[in-house]
C-alpha cells in the first residue's frame, strides 16, 4: 500500500543562533545550526506531528496566523522557501 504524501510549505529563516525551519501550514518548527539540518529536523517534526494527529483523530491543519508568519512579518530574514513533501504512516488499532 502506498503511503499518502502531503505537500506543505517549508520556510527557513536565520536567527542569531542558527536557522529556524517552519511549516506555516501546520505551525510546526525546528531549529539547527545549518540549513540542511534545519530542513531535516523540520521534516521529522512535521512527520511526527501528522502521524500523532491522524492516529489520535486530532486536528492537524493549523496554519500560522498571517500576522505571525515570518514570510510577512520579517521577510528580510527568510533564507529560502521550499516544498516540504511528507510521507506519513498511519496505523489503525481495533
Image (cartoon, rainbow, N blue to C red):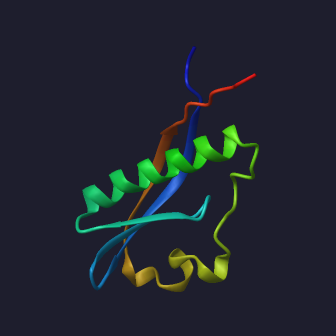
Most foreground residue, 30 or 73: 30
Relative to 30, is 86 on the left or the right?
right
Image point (70%, 25%), residue name? 93
Placement of 3 over or under 22, stated as above or below:
above
Q: Position of residue 84 (x, y in %)?
A: 47, 48
Q: Position of residue 66 (x, y in %)?
A: 66, 77
Position of the N terminus, as image quadrant, is top right
Position of the C terminus, as image quadrant, is top right
Placement of 40 over or under 72, stated as above or below:
above
Answer with the quarter of the image where residue 21 lies.
Answer: bottom left
Image point (65%, 83%), residue name? 67
Looking at the image, the residue that sits furthest to the front is 94
Q: Where is residue 36 in the image (x, y as percent from the top left)?
A: 26, 56
Looking at the image, the residue that sits furthest to the top is 1
Image point (59%, 41%), residue name? 51
What is the number of callouts on the image? 0
Image point (61%, 59%), residue name? 26
Looking at the image, the residue that sits furthest to the left is 34
Q: Where is residue 45 in the image (x, y as percent from the top left)?
A: 47, 53
Most foreground residue, 56 or 73: 56
Relative to 7, is 67 on the left or the right?
right
Amino acid at each position: 500500500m502506498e503511503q499518502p504524501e502531503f505537500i506543505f510549505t517549508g520556510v527557513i529563516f536565520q536567527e542569531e543562533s542558527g536557522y529556524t525551519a517552519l511549516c506555516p501550514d501546520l505551525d510546526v518548527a525546528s531549529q539547527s545550526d545549518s540549513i540542511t539540518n534545519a530542513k531535516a529536523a523540520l521534516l521529522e517534526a512535521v512527520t511526527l506531528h501528522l502521524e500523532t494527529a491522524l492516529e489520535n483523530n486530532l486536528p492537524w491543519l493549523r496554519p500560522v496566523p498571517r500576522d505571525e508568519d515570518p514570510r510577512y512579518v520579517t521577510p528580510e530574514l527568510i533564507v529560502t522557501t521550499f516544498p516540504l513533501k511528507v510521507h506519513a504512516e498511519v496505523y489503525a488499532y481495533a
